[in-house]
Image (cartoon, rainbow, N blue to C red):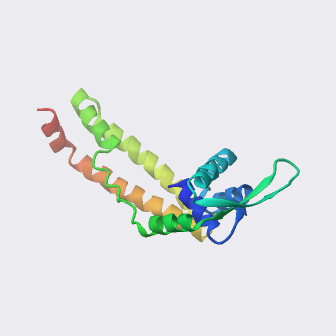
Amino acid sequence: MSIGLTLLGLLEPGPRHGYDLKRAYDEHFGQDHPLHYGQVYATLSRLLKNGLVELTAVEPGAGPDRKRYAITDAGVTDLAAWLARPEQPEPYLQSTLYTKVVLALLSGRSAVDILDAQRTAHLALMRTLTRRKSGGDLADQLICDHALFHLEADLRWLELTAARLDALAQEVVR
């Protein structure tokens, strides 16, 4: 996810200070990875340099001056283009897990153990996400559902691979 474009989206309703942007970002998107203040100000500096935001006010504070930023017309154009562009689907055509299974087969190690360990890790994460989802607000529920659906697809692949392991072993260990 682009932090710069996300900050532009948070600025579109109206000007904000960097502190307010960090708070809004963390509230909506930072449950697992909150932004550091340095990231916010470095990103705002880059957006300012590129003409996507502008300073609307500099207010004295107890510490450093508080700068208020607003999105420019160019920023609105970039944000609109990004929002309209579909995300590239990620088809995991060459996953690390598949590589581990093949290497286990080639080396005489147990590919079943690798698949079982991965299944256990997936199920543990699914339990964690399900607990988080049950206590979360709608945004958290939607984020958890997205992750859970991907994990369910991975589990289906693990089961299918386990069922085809003998055939795969014959192909790889020729």
The answer to whether one can see residue 136 in this image is: no
Task: Using residue 61 as the reference point, say whether residue 145 is left or right of it.
Answer: left
Picture residue at 59% right of the left edge, 51% below the top:
49
In the rendered image, the vertical position of residue 103 relative to residue 115, given as above or below: above
Residue 140: x %, y % from top left: 58, 64
The answer to whether one can see residue 73 in this image is: yes
Report the quarter where the C terminus lies: top left
Q: Quadrant of residue 132?
A: bottom right
Residue 24: x %, y % from top left: 67, 62
Picture residue at 62% right of the left edge, 65% below the top:
71
Depth check: 3 or 158 in front?
Answer: 3
Depth check: 13 or 93 in front?
Answer: 13
How many numbered marks does the figure carry? Answer: 0
Taking the view exactly as shown, the residue that stands out farthest to the left is 174
Task: Using residue 95 as the reference point, say whether residue 39 is left or right of it.
Answer: right
Task: Using residue 116 as the reference point, say whether residue 44 is left or right of it.
Answer: right
Taking the view exactly as shown, the residue that stands out farthest to the top is 107
In the rendered image, the vertical position of residue 72 relative to residue 156, given as above or below: below
Residue 103: x %, y % from top left: 27, 32
Picture residue at 28% right of the left edge, 33% below the top:
104
Residue 138: x %, y % from top left: 59, 71
